[in-house]
Image (cartoon, rainbow, N blue to C red):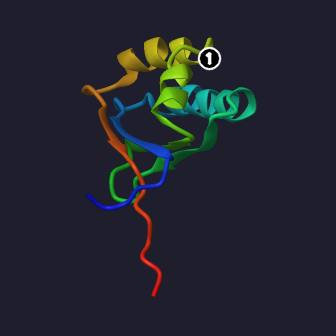
Amino acid sequence: MADTLQQFVVIAEFHVREGELDAFLALAHNDASESLANESGCQQFDVLLADDQANTVMLHEVYDSREAFDHHTQMPHYKPFKEGSEPLLESEPKVRFFHPTVRPQN
């Protein structure tokens, strides 16, 4: 197995219902802002729109560890995002977890 960095990366893909994008983005941006402001283990939280699919939103989140991400899901600002976004979605989000690898030194 390749050497990995300690960071834990989450990439979540959401397909938002027609007409609900602004509401979803408001929830996502609030979660991102609160995470960055109140979670020392959250290093990056990007809310991204797909170029080729108007209602597809990706969240790219970087945490110090899996434990920091698990802590994120227990924070007060997470529940309103989770519960508020569910009715805005066409389908279940696709969430994937990653660990960055160490680039070899030449």
User: In which quadrant of the rendered view does residue 95 lie?
Assistant: top left
Rendered position, 39 above or below 106: above
- Indicate the quadrant containing the C terminus: top left, top right, bottom left or bottom right: bottom left
Q: Which residue is mark 1?
A: 77
Is residue 59 visible in this depiction of the protein? no
State the residue at coordinates (24%, 27%).
Answer: 91
Is residue 27 visible in this depiction of the protein? yes
* Residue 2, position as x, y percentages in the image: 31, 61
User: Between 17 and 57, which is closer to the camera in this rendering?
Assistant: 57
Rendered position, 16 above or below 86: below
Q: Residues within 10 Å of mark 1 (few under 14, many from 20)?
A: some
State the residue at coordinates (35%, 36%).
Answer: 14
| Number of dots carrying numbers | 1
State the residue at coordinates (55%, 23%).
Answer: 72
Instruction: Please name the amino acid that badge 1 sits on.
Output: His
State the residue at coordinates (50%, 27%).
Answer: 67
* Residue 77, position as x, y percentages in the image: 62, 17
User: In which quadrant of the rendered view does residue 4 lie?
Assistant: bottom left
In the image, taking residue 90 as reference, residue 77 lies left or right, namely right
Rendered position, 13 above or below 19: below
User: Between 7 and 97, which is closer to the camera in this rendering?
Assistant: 7
* Residue 104, position as x, y percentages in the image: 42, 76
User: Between 95 and 81, which is closer to the camera in this rendering?
Assistant: 95
